[in-house]
Image: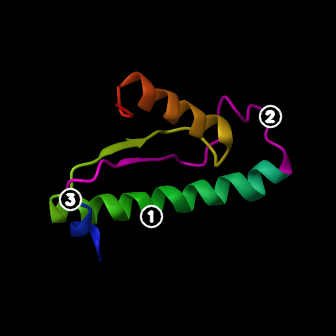
Amino acid sequence: MQAARLKGIPLWITASTGEPGKYTPNPTPADIVQGVPLEILAKSQSEAFKAAADKAGVKAHYDFSSVGTHTWGYWSDQVWQMQRTGWFN
């Protein structure tokens, strides 16, 4: 509802499918119960935000990968990607 207020603010939005990947090659029951639903929800909400932001003319970087659960390794990868692209400069 407030997406238009974010115009001009740098945004990096990322989420995944909840499919276990390189940081959860042998997922534990806790990985499945916690990380999968959280990431599915994060991706759903991030895609809804993208639709609203696009409609409002808000520019952002989006990365919706096909593999990844709600775990630190995937977050870390995104931070390093931000660093490599000069996001923090």
Answer whether labels 3 and 2 touch (C-beta < 8 Å).
no
The three-letter code of the residue at mark 2 reads Asn
Neighbor class of circle 3 (other Cα within 10 Å; few <14, some 14-19, many 20+) is some
Residue 57 rendering spot, x and y as whole percentages: 15, 59
Residue named by callout 3: 7
The residue positioned 48% from the left and 55% from the top of the image is 43
In the image, is residue 60 part of the stretch drawn in magenta?
no
The three-letter code of the residue at mark 3 reads Lys
The three-letter code of the residue at mark 1 reads Gln
Residue 70 rendering spot, x and y as whole percentages: 64, 49
The residue positioned 84% from the left and 44% from the top of the image is 28
Of circles 2 and 1, the one toward us is: 1
Callout 2: SS? loop
Q: Earlier in the sequence, mark 1 or mark 3?
A: 3
- Residue lying furthest top: 84
Residue numbers of the magenta segment: 7-29
Q: In the image, is 23 to the left or to the right of 29?
A: left
Callout 1: SS? helix
Label 1 to label 3, Cα distance in Å?
A: 19 Å
